[in-house]
Image (cartoon, grey):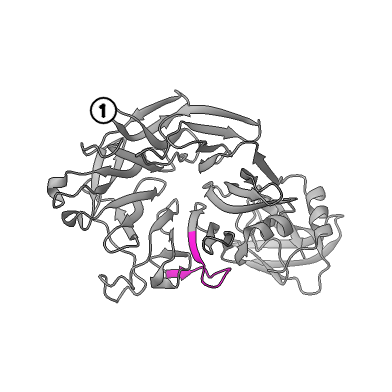
Amino acid sequence: MKSLPILFVIFVLLTVGTVEAQFTIKDTFLEVTGVSNQGLVAGYEAQGGPYFIWNADAGTTAQIGGIAPGNGVGGQAGFSDEGDYLSGTSQGSVSAELSRYDTHAQQWIPLGSLGFIVDNSMSGGYAISGDGNTVVGNSWADPLLSGGVFCTHAVAWSSSEGLMDLGSMFASTGRSARANAVSYDGSVVVGWQDFNGPWKSAVWRKNPSGGYLPNEYLLIDPNGNPNDEFNQLGECSAVSADGKWIGGYGDYANNYEPWIWSEATGVINLGTLAVGAQGYVTGMNADATVVVGWFSQGMWDPNIPFIWTPTDGLMDLNTYFTNVLGFNLGTSRVYVPSRLSANGQYLAGWGIDESSFMFFSFRAKLFTVGMSHVKPTNQLSLYPNPAHQQVFIKNVGKAKFTLSTLEGSLVESKEVIGDCIFNLAGYKAGIYVVTQQTAKHTLTSKLVVY
């Protein structure tokens, strides 16, 4: 996608009053592990915790307890969609356990384990479903079932079924598995399965009879050998709300590119921003029309954060923040976008100030009119937006569409049955108004043309 001229971006920011963009840096570093649909950020400042919730709008950080990763304990404090609950790890009756935090009661509730302690924990919570009713992670299993070697099994806890052992494909040989993410209703759980390293994809689907079906690999060639590690996608790190889309880490099997997958499309490699770099998906919105992550170039070269959409493809996130959203980053450079809210409105992670060489945490409130994946508040579905060559408008039935200037001058109109397309070749850069009139309603949306 072509970059918007900076003066034009400023014009957009000044004239579109219904949409807000914001980039906020935390004064002390927070390892970001979650962000809610309301923009609250969860994370921790030191190994072992406790966890904190950062309210970037109010400029406050509140300690919520729990046991953060480190000192032999694992887990991630991730939000349910509306911020009512978090996943994580807290102190159980004997040791650290997979847990759920109630933000209203301000209390951690340990959810159980498979009964074995290694280091300082028995189990760890890594993600929570959008509805808050399912927490997933891993737990140490009985070494007598794994050749005398301690290994972890993926586990899931639900409010209706309690703790469930999701197992490991190779538990008998001491190979571990872990659940990293879960769909909105808990029906699809994704994570990793160890066999020969690096960790490979693992997907558990809800069994209608109760519990979950055994984990399966995601394959590059669905007709190929499922036991060929060069046909197995890497670790799964994200899943869409409906469970249809899964994202994950690149490895040698797909030229180290970050990827997304659905049963309908198979694997979609997202590309690369640096030759030879390894890509990692860290989050996606509810329908996978926005995917974020980063590329590792090795020890001595900076990480490259990315944002991907179906219409615009892969973009450097720093470039996107600066040229499209109009953020003034100054000497700050984002390195890793750690979490994206399910509604696609908030992005949080960390970076480095290239002047002071200090780490910082950030939360970005995304400028929705400049992102083609987000519907305007009046629900007219325009994409892409901003647009250059043409704009597509989702419509059912008969409707009249008009394209006008902000001052109200008619530019073009058409009556259609079904979807509408305006060709924009030759249009001046600026903000236009699209109006849809049907027998039942009239809706309008602003359209940015560049």
Q: Position of residue 440 (x, y in %)?
A: 64, 51
Q: Position of residue 55 (x, y in %)?
A: 60, 33
Image: 104 above or below 154: above
Q: Is residue 219 left or right of residue 68?
A: left
Q: Position of residue 28 (x, y in %)?
A: 61, 36
Q: Which residue is mark 1?
A: 94
Q: Amino acid at mark 1?
A: Val
From the viewer's side, name the closer residue of 307 and 38: 307
- Camera sees residue 118: yes
Image: 168 above or below 270: above
Q: Position of residue 363 (x, y in %)?
A: 62, 43
- Camera sees residue 418: no
Q: Is residue 42 left or right of residue 395?
A: left
| Element marked by disc 1 | loop
Q: Is residue 96 left or right of residue 43?
A: left
From the viewer's side, name the closer residue of 132 and 201: 201
The residue lying at 62 percent from left, 43 percent from top is 360
Task: Tell me the quarter of the image containing the N terminus.
Answer: bottom right
Q: Is residue 249 left or right of residue 213?
A: right
Answer few, some or many: residues within 10 Å of disc 1's Cα (few below 14, many 20 plus, some between 14 and 19).
Answer: few
The residue lying at 38 percent from left, 63 percent from top is 234
Q: Which residues are magenta?
A: 267-280
